[in-house]
Amino acid sequence: MHIWVDADACPVAIKEILFRAAQRTGLDMTLVANHAMQVPKAPNIRFSQVEKGFDVADNAIVERVEAGDLVITGDIPLAAEIVAKGARGLSPRGDLYTAENVRARLNMRDFMATLRDSGVDTGGAPPLSQADRQQFASRLDRILAQAVPRS
């Protein structure tokens, strides 16, 4: 399993959890973003900078992801694409994207965009809370425990 991170909007606290997990498990992890960022110097943690542009980072992830990989993203359309390829998706809040729920999430996202486009103030996502971080770390640990055999 390779861990892919849609890093442009990934919160720093989530990246730190991911760095520790990659170092602990030895799994390969690639952060993809259209702006430069620092990653720990570790042989299994990489950074891939892509050109600026709409969905360029998302498209790079979709091109490279394979069935069984894990993608960290808050982007519902990206989640739908990677789930269709057999990969798992996990939001920075710890929500698992599955074939069963990603279509409904995509429909809700589109509905909310329609409301916003018609002038309705739908508010935004609340700031990432400590409970969100804990839920993410817990869900990530369960996924990694299935992927990495214990020695």
Image (cartoon, helix red, strand yellow):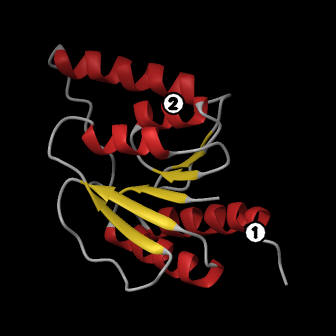
Q: CA distance from mark 2 to mark 1?
A: 24 Å
Q: Is residue 83 left or right of residue 74?
A: right
* Residue 131 % position (x, y): 51, 66
Question: On the rendered image, what quadrant is the N terminus found in?
Answer: bottom right
Residue at 62 percent across and 30 percent down: it is: 101
Residues 92 and 2: in front is: 2
Picture quadrant of residue 104: top right
Residue that numbered label 1 is attached to: 145
* Residue 117 % position (x, y): 18, 17
Residues 93 and 131: in front is: 93
Residue at 72 percent across and 64 percent down: it is: 142
Tell me: residue 7, above or below residue 83. below
The kind of secondary structure element at disc 2 is helix
Tell me: residue 47, above or below residue 58. below
Q: Amino acid at mark 2?
A: Ala
Q: Is residue 14 left or right of residue 122?
A: right
Q: Amino acid at mark 1?
A: Ala
Q: Is residue 73 left or right of residue 112?
A: right
Residue at 49 percent across and 62 percent down: it is: 132
In terms of sequence position, does the residue under pointer 2 or pointer 1 come before the other? 2
Residue that numbered label 2 is attached to: 80
Neighbours of disc 2 within 10 Å: few (<14), some (14-19), many (20+)? many
Residue at 33 percent across and 71 percent down: it is: 12
